[in-house]
Image (tube, grey):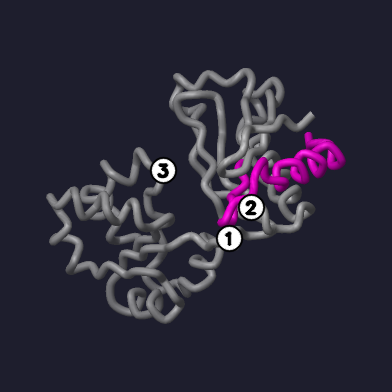
Amino acid sequence: MPLDPNSLLSTIDQVKKPEKKRNFTQSIELIVALKGIDVKKPENRMSELVSLPHPLRKKGKVCVVASGSLAVNARNAGADYVILSEELEKLSGDKKAVKRLAREYDFFVAEAPLMPLVGRIFGSVLGPRGKMPTPVPPNIDVGPVLQRQRASIRVRVRDQPTAACSIGDDGMDGKHIAENVQAVISRIEERYEREIRSLGSVYLKSTMGSPLKVQ
């Protein structure tokens, strides 16, 4: 069930007005509390990429693990970093390097045949962060995949029945932020269609601001 548009826009306007002047662009975060979800059950947890109708202005960085023509394709398509198949083994056992990659890149894409090796080397680090690579065929045009990733945000529900994610910044049009909020809410409701009794509280906050409840 979509949020009331007027209430949502009103809350966004309040969030965009800083409590005091900041010298940087503040992100705007959506926080959704869920009812009727037992997150102790692994099947009730969530880690999904949700495409936003209005992508964040600060684009996520994408790392691609590939070989041959797919690696060339990824570079030409503007991947932020490409790990060649022959470089994978060098990362095995180097957990510091893997953690550094996990911090630096928001999304990972991997050539499907390499996924077993990628899982062995990256799984213990990327898995808990919800950043396991999206597998793609070796002959795919990876450009659209990178575009979709950069136009998406990751929505996670883990140890608490709460989802939190960035859905814009204080320089974005309020209506665009509202449409992003509704897109995330819709996906959460689809994910928990059978289990969820109702949405709990919905809040918005800026980086340095206090959470404001959408009435």
Front disc: 2 or 1 = 2
Instruction: Where is residue 81? Give x, y as percent.
Output: 34, 69
Magenta span includes 92: no
Looking at the rendering, the stretch of residues picked out in magenta corresponds to 1-29
Query: Which image quadrant: the C terminus?
Result: top right
Label 3 Cα crowd, 10 Å radius (few <14 / some 14-19 / many 20+)? some
The kind of residue tagged 3 is Gly
- For the residue pair 152 and 208, the one nearer the viewer reads as 208
Q: Quick check: 28 above or below 85?
A: above
Q: Residue furthest right?
A: 6
10 to the left or right of 20: right
Instruction: Where is residue 18? Give x, y as percent.
Output: 67, 45
Residue at the spot of label 1: 151
Instruction: Where is residue 62? Give x, y as percent.
Output: 42, 63
Disc number placed over residue 136 in the picture, else none: none
Q: Give whichever of discs 1 and 3 has the lower sequence position.
A: 3
Disc number placed over residue 168 in the picture, else none: 2
Label 1 Cα crowd, 10 Å radius (few <14 / some 14-19 / many 20+)? many
Residue at the spot of label 3: 130
